[in-house]
Image (tube, rainbow, N blue to C red):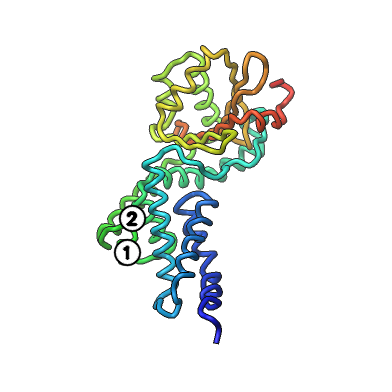
């Protein structure tokens, strides 16, 4: 007969792919998902697997509780290191007819869904993902978030309405026009106009030399953007990995920041901003920008 620990290893490995996928969808971060699943393994290793009636449900509950704690912690601390969302920063002229832009448009529905998931409250997101994506029953979801099964069902229903009502992505030319409007407002230091082109819950990921920080809300991004005129910064629209973005550089010609923008329904809903000078120095810029 196999040792209980060996049985636990084998049983856990069978569950691992599902658990990682579940945690990744709930947390939006591969590293955080792996950490959540590893924590589940640590807890399982302390158990006698023979005492667990339903291992799949037990592991789902553990991973779910780790994820809800992580989501609630993020909500309390809006600046949290997250995974690198952009591995390569390829800068090109922003050509609306380019093959890259067509590929981005095809993927934009998925991007819009990710933005909506990020905007859900922790309890809503967990209830929706567990039930609608992984078919976890509400009587199991309720204890994970500390609510009744009926309350969990209501949370999932509310989240579902938000997801189903997610705005449709705009076409590439409109996306570029929105970024142009953002740039014009930034150049003029027009705070109110910046707020008009930014979604109130815009997610701003800042890729720094020390890691990635995330901020949520239009005011912080608008305040930072309107500092450009006083800081002697030049900025223009570019393509970043096939998406409309912004390249800014100092008076001495050195790149200051690179932004990739996700535009939905005529507003910028997500921004990835690279400010790490070492990484900026390695980016191959088109001749027209040098």
Q: Is residue 62 visible in the rendered structure shown here?
A: yes
Give the crowd class for mark 1: few <14, some 14-19, many >=20 residues within 10 Å. many
**Percent of width and height locating residue 219:** 40, 26
Q: Of the residues under marks 1 and 2, which one precedes in the sequence?
A: 1
Residue shown at 47%/59% (left/top)?
22
Extreme bottom residue here?
A: 1
Residue shown at 48%/57% (left/top)?
36
Residue shown at 50%/27% (left/top)?
178
**Which quadrant of the structure image shows residue 152?**
bottom left
Q: Nearer the viewer, residue 179 or 153?
A: 153
For residue 138, the mark is 1
Say which quadrant the C terminus sits in.
top right
Where disc 1 sits, the SS reads helix
**Percent of width and height locating residue 255:** 64, 23
**Which quadrant of the structure image shows residue 99?**
top right
**In the rendered image, the vertical position of residue 66 relative to residue 186, given as above or below:** below
- Asked whether, in this view, residue 68 is left or right of residue 88, the answer is left
């Amino acid at each position: 007969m196999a040792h209980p620990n060996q049985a636990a290893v084998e049983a856990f490995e069978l569950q691992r792919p599902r658990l990682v996928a579940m945690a990744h969808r709930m947390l939006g971060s591969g590293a955080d998902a792996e950490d959540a699943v590893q924590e589940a393994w640590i807890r399982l290793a302390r158990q006698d697997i023979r005492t667990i009636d339903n291992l799949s449900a037990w592991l789902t509950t553990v991973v779910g509780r780790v994820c809800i704690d992580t989501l609630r912690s993020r909500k309390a601390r809006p600046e949290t290191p997250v995974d690198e969302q952009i591995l390569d920063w390829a800068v090109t002229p922003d050509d609306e007819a380019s093959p890259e832009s067509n590929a981005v448009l095809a993927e934009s529905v998925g991007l819009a869904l990710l933005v909506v998931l990020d905007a859900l409250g922790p309890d809503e997101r967990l209830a929706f993902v567990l039930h609608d994506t992984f078919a976890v029953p509400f009587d199991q979801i309720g204890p994970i978030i500390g609510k009744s099964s009926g309350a969990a069902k209501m949370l999932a229903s509310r989240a579902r309405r938000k997801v189903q009502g997610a705005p449709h992505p705009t076409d590439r030319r409109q996306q570029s026009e929105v970024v142009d409007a953002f740039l014009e407002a930034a150049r003029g230091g027009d705070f109110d106009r910046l707020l008009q082109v930014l979604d109130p819950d815009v997610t701003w990921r800042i890729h720094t030399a020390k890691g990635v920080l995330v901020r949520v809300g239009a005011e912080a991004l608008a305040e930072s953007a309107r500092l450009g005129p006083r800081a002697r910064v030049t900025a223009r629209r570019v393509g970043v990995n096939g998406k409309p973005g912004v390249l800014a550089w100092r008076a001495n010609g050195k790149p200051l920041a690179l932004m990739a923008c996700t535009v939905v329904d005529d507003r910028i809903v997500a921004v990835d901003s690279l400010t790490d000078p070492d990484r900026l120095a390695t980016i191959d810029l088109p001749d027209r920008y040098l």
